[in-house]
Amino acid sequence: MRLRQKYRMRTPSTGREVVVEAAPGVDYVDRETGEDLEVVAQLLPLAPTASELPWAVENLRFCNWCDQLTQKDLNDCPHCGRRMDPLGS
Ligand SMILES: [Zn+2]
């Protein structure tokens, strides 16, 4: 289970972007320029999550119980909490 939220962060002067698993109350700076990184976006799925897969069509399936989209690397549906059928069955 991943508890920390992942963010896409950008260095203002160079536009370089990195993905950071950020902890609350910590300032993140660019290793080369020393600038404060600005947050560009939060990555889905939001923490806490049992899935490491990005929220993208190729990583999603429909729960066979509630028909909601869930990540393929999960056994239990995050919407209804039930155990989903194995993939490919
Ligand atoms: Zn479900």
Image (cartoon, helix red, strand yellow):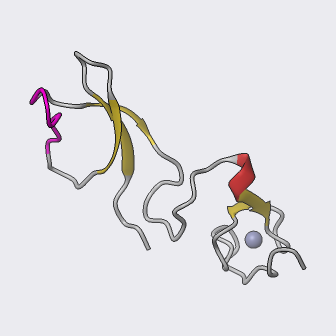
Residue 19 in percent (x, y) is at 36, 44
Instruction: Give the mark count.
Output: 0
Seen at 12% across and 26% down, the residue is 33
Q: What residue range appears in magenta?
A: 27-34
Residue 50 in percent (x, y) is at 51, 71
Residue furthest to the left in view is 34
Is residue 12 one of those drawn in magenta?
no
Residue 27 in percent (x, y) is at 14, 42
Left or right, 47 with reference to 69: left
Residue furthest to the top in view is 13
Work out which quarter of the rendered image holds the C terminus and state it.
bottom right
Answer above or below: position of 73 versus 8: below
Residue 81 in percent (x, y) is at 66, 78
Seen at 72% across and 81% down, the residue is 82
Seen at 47% across and 45% down, the residue is 43
Answer above or below: position of 79 versus 26: below
Q: Locate ligand 1 by image quadrant.
A: bottom right
Left or right, 59 with reference to 36: right
Prevailing SS of the magenta stretch: loop
Answer above or below: position of 13 versus 63: above
Work out which quarter of the rendered image holds the N terminus and state it.
bottom left
Q: Report which quarter residue 84 is drawn in.
A: bottom right
Left or right, 37 with reference to 64: left
Residue furthest to the front in view is 32
Work out whether residue 82 or residue 84 is closer to the camera in this orientation and state it. 84
